[in-house]
């Protein structure tokens, strides 16, 4: 009643005296209610009346404060904040306590909430209205360049007080919660130049992250409830409507967080770890994550629109921040299993956005850490390969992601490998040239690590790089890879990975460059054979292929001839095996025409089969490799090999499979047996060959391991499909159990179907075992490299040693050799045209006497000058 009679200039004097008293009274009423609410009951009418009177008084205090706010709003011009400084702080204190009381009311009134529910509802309604009016008032007020420290402090207090209120009302009212946050962000941006250094940025951003996560979890819970109703009744359920409202809140918090980071990114660098974790956790709860709930398509689309789209905008704001790059790319980062795939998808999203970023941001992500004082971080390409390797379960399941939209085609689902390959290749196509050496370094590191599928992904990207680049670049890379292949041990995984890459890269070379490759890695030199073991000869031009084929066959022939001339010694089998690997590359990876090369290859195989003895093969491991190669080569040349030679091979294989021979030999034997389906055996030779063939198939189909059994089934099916000797099939299946296995295999019968959940659990348990195995392989390679380096260092810097002490025999031998050399030189001089000096004869007699004494063991006191 007195406010209309008080001028605007005297308002603060009134408010500063009255409002603190009102707040104190409000607090005392609140404390009295809190202390006595537990004893409330319908029988205790006196206490009930007291509490209701207190609540009514609290409502009246809030109404009075609302009147104060409405009065200030009635002025034509918005007042200065200095003129009403006490009003916002007092009101916000009352509002927070009110909302807190309403939030805790159910627990506080001990199940007797109905006795005061009407007054609590009125209290909340008045508080809601009061906050709305206060925010409208503060929205009208503006600070100019002459703003005082008190006014700035007041704005900061208002923002922080409303932030505290948000933590209370988050579960009370969605609209009030959203409007409060809108006001907080609006005021923060409005007075950014005044308050940016005073705001609690960590609390604001953290609260936004928490609210986003909380609303997202609520969406998932509601989606699960909606899913139980079925698609027909889904839209009619109240849970669905609440789900839609919650998704709007989720989208609101995500967009608000993006907006806040955009405006205050320079103050939020230290909180990048929280933003990173937020991204990973939300992605981990959405398909295709293995840890996400299965949702109906409409619900999943709503969640994606509410969370994923804003998260992409969030990345755009975070990309230029060095702390964000450090936390995403750091080398020593370890993630929970459910966050491995989200981390991989995050890196791919970052890679897709780098094309539009300035140079400083590109350096931040492409280069990795450059100096020792920086937090160690990967270049983004290496980080992607490392992350892909850790997604072992997701690769093996596999998880499916949306493919690229192509004109005229429906959007398909693709695996993680293809998803990464497409985005990596697109990035390579737009990569600035200055970062190309870093890409090359990342590719070679990925190829040389132990996980085969990661190496295959790097191989795919490398081949795209070679195709997209110049022919000279492809040649340069092939020469580099070839040299690496020559230095690798054939037992290492690196040799296999590099060989696969080399094999594919040769297809991309021009004919002239292929001829240059033949010149650089001449097939006629033994040290270059590891290169040609991997290359498919059909990838070469006609001229290059003919030269390579001819030189490899000639080299094999020479090696075999040298071995035979040396007496066919087992100690020299390594050279023969090396040559046979070259011949294997010719017969398997290049079409051999009916020419001299074919005849030479068949002749070599015939010669070697005549030397193979089963007992020696079982005794000497060097012959295991020989037999394996010989069987493989024979399978490729089986149509040109004599039947007598085939019979010798079957005798040798039959003697071996009855013993415990290496699996590699068994697999080569199966390849050879399968190829015999192409051969028609004449009637005169059938009695020798066909029973052996049936017996071998029978033994191998009842193999000792499931892996060999599977290969045996494949080999037998291939043989049965093309053979003319059907009696071999029936005789091979004389055992009923073997017959059942073959029938089930041919009819594609599955014995037991593993449930999806069981399979997923098994894959999750297997993944760490596989990673440990890869880690051990890499540790062995590193240990071998360290040992080699230490050996090289020892050779280059030998330790000081004491002088070698010769024994008597060594010293005597050295003196005798010196004397003999001197005498031979004297004889040459005496045979010349010049006459001999007169003293020569006497000196020679003295030497003769000395030699006699030495040979007879006599001691002498002759002068030592002789």
Image (spheres, rainbow, N blue to C red):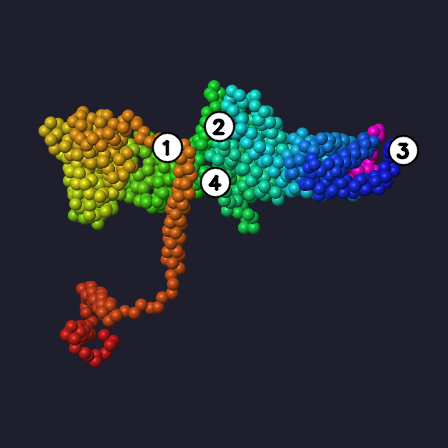
Distance between the alpha carbons at the discs numbered 4 and 2: 22 Å
Q: Counting other residues with Cα less than 10 Å from the Cα at mark 3, is it few (<14), some (14-19), or many (20 or more)?
A: few
Q: Nearer the viewer, residue 213 or 573?
A: 213
Quadrant that contains the N terminus: top right
The residue where tag 3 is placed is 5
Residue 293 visible in the snapshot:
yes
Which element is circle 3 on?
helix
Return the mark for residue 754. Answer: 1
The residue where tag 2 is placed is 402
The stretch drawn in magenta includes residue 78? yes
Q: Counting other residues with Cα less than 10 Å from the Cα at mark 2, is it few (<14), some (14-19), or many (20 or more)?
A: few
Distance between the alpha carbons at the discs numbered 2 and 1: 26 Å
The stretch drawn in magenta includes residue 323? no
Tell me whether circle 4 and circle 3 mark residues in contact (CB < 8 Å).
no
Q: Nearer the viewer, residue 339 or 351?
A: 339
The residue where tag 4 is placed is 337
Question: What range of the chain is rendered magenta?
Answer: 74-91
């Amino acid at each position: 009643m007195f406010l209309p009679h008080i001028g605007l200039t005297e308002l603060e004097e009134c408010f500063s005296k009255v409002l603190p008293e009102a707040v104190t009274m409000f607090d005392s009423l609140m404390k009295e209610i809190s202390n006595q609410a537990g004893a409330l009951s319908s029988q205790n009418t006196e206490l009930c009346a007291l509490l209701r009177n207190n609540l009514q008084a609290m409502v009246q205090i809030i109404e009075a404060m609302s009147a104060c706010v409405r009065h200030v709003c009635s002025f034509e011009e918005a007042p200065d904040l200095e003129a009403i400084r006490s009003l916002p702080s007092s009101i916000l204190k009352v509002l927070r306590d009110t909302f807190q009381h309403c939030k805790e009311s159910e627990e506080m009134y001990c199940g007797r909430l109905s006795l005061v529910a009407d007054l609590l509802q009125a209290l909340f309604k008045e508080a809601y209205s009061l906050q709305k009016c206060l925010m409208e008032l503060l929205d009208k007020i503006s600070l100019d360049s002459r703003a005082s420290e008190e006014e700035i402090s007041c704005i900061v207090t208002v923002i922080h007080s409303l932030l505290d209120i948000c933590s209370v009302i988050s579960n009370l009212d969605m609209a009030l919660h959203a409007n409060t946050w809108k006001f907080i962000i609006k005021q923060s941006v409005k007075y950014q130049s005044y308050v940016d250094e005073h705001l609690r940025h960590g609390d604001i951003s953290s609260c936004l992250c928490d609210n986003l996560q909380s609303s997202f979890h609520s969406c998932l819970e509601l989606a699960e409830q909606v899913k139980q109703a079925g698609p027909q009744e889904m839209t009619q359920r109240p849970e669905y409507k609440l789900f839609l409202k919650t998704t709007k809140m989720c989208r609101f918090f995500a967009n608000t967080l993006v907006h806040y980071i955009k405006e205050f990114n320079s103050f939020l660098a230290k909180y990048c770890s929280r933003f990173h974790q937020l991204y990973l956790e939300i992605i981990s709860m959405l398909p295709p994550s293995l840890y996400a709930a299965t949702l109906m398509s409409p619900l999943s689309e709503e969640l994606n629109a509410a969370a994923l789209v804003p998260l992409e905008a969030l990345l755009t704001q975070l990309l230029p921040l060095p702390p964000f790059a450090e936390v995403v790319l750091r080398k020593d980062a370890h993630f929970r299993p459910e966050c491995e795939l989200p981390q991989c998808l995050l890196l791919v999203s970052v890679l897709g956005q780098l094309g539009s970023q300035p140079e400083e941001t590109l350096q931040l992500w492409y280069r990795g850490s450059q100096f020792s004082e920086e937090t160690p971080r990967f270049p983004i390409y290496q980080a992607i390969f490392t992350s892909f390797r850790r997604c072992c379960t997701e690769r093996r399941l596999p998880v499916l992601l949306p493919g690229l939209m192509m004109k005229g085609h429906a959007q398909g689902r693709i695996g993680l490998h293809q998803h990464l390959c497409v985005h990596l290749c697109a990035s390579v196509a737009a990569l600035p040239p200055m970062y190309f050496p870093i890409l090359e370094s990342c590719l070679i590191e990925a190829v040389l690590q132990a996980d085969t599928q990661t190496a295959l992904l790097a191989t795919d990207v490398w081949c795209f790089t070679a195709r997209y680049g110049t022919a000279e670049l492809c040649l340069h890379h092939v020469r580099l890879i070839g040299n690496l292949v020559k230095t690798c041990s054939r037992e290492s995984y690196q040799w296999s990975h590099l060989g696969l890459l080399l094999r594919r890269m040769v297809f991309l070379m021009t004919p002239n460059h292929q001829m240059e490759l033949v010149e650089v890695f001449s097939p006629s030199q033994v040290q270059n054979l590891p290169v040609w073991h991997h290359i498919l000869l059909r990838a070469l031009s006609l001229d290059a292929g003919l030269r390579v084929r001819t030189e490899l066959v000639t080299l094999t022939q020479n090696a075999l001839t040298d071995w035979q001339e040396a007496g066919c010694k087992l100690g020299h089998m390594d050279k023969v095996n090396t040559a046979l690997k070259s011949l294997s590359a010719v017969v398997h990876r290049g079409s051999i025409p009916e020419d001299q090369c074919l005849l030479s290859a068949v002749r070599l195989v015939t010669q070697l089969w005549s030397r193979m003895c089963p007992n020696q093969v079982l005794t000497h491991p060097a012959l295991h490799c020989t037999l394996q190669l010989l069987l493989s080569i024979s399978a490729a040349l089986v149509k040109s090999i004599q039947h007598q030679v085939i019979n010798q091979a079957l005798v040798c294989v039959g003697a071996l499979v009855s013993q415990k021979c290496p699996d590699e030999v068994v697999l080569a034997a199966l390849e050879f047996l399968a190829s015999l389906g192409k051969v028609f055996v004449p009637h005169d030779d059938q009695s020798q060959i066909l029973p052996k063939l049936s017996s071998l198939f029978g033994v191998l189909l009842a193999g000792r391991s499931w892996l060999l059994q599977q290969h045996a089934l494949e080999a037998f099916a291939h043989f049965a499909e093309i053979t003319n000797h059907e009696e071999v099939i029936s005789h091979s299946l004389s055992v009923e159990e073997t017959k059942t296995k073959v029938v089930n295999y041919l009819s594609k019968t599955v014995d037991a179907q593993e449930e999806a959940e069981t399979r997923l659990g098994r894959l999750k348990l297997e993944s760490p075992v596989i990673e440990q195995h890869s880690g051990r392989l890499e540790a062995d390679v590193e240990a071998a490299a360290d040992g080699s380096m230490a050996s090289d260092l020892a050779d280059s810097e030998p330790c000081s040693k004491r002088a070698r002490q010769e024994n008597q025999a060594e010293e005597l031998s050295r003196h005798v050799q010196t004397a003999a050399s001197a005498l031979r030189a004297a004889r040459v001089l005496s045979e010349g045209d010049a006459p001999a000096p007169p003293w020569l004869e006497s000196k020679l007699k003295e030497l003769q006497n000395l030699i006699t004494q030495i040979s007879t063991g006599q001691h002498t006191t002759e002068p030592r000058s002789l």
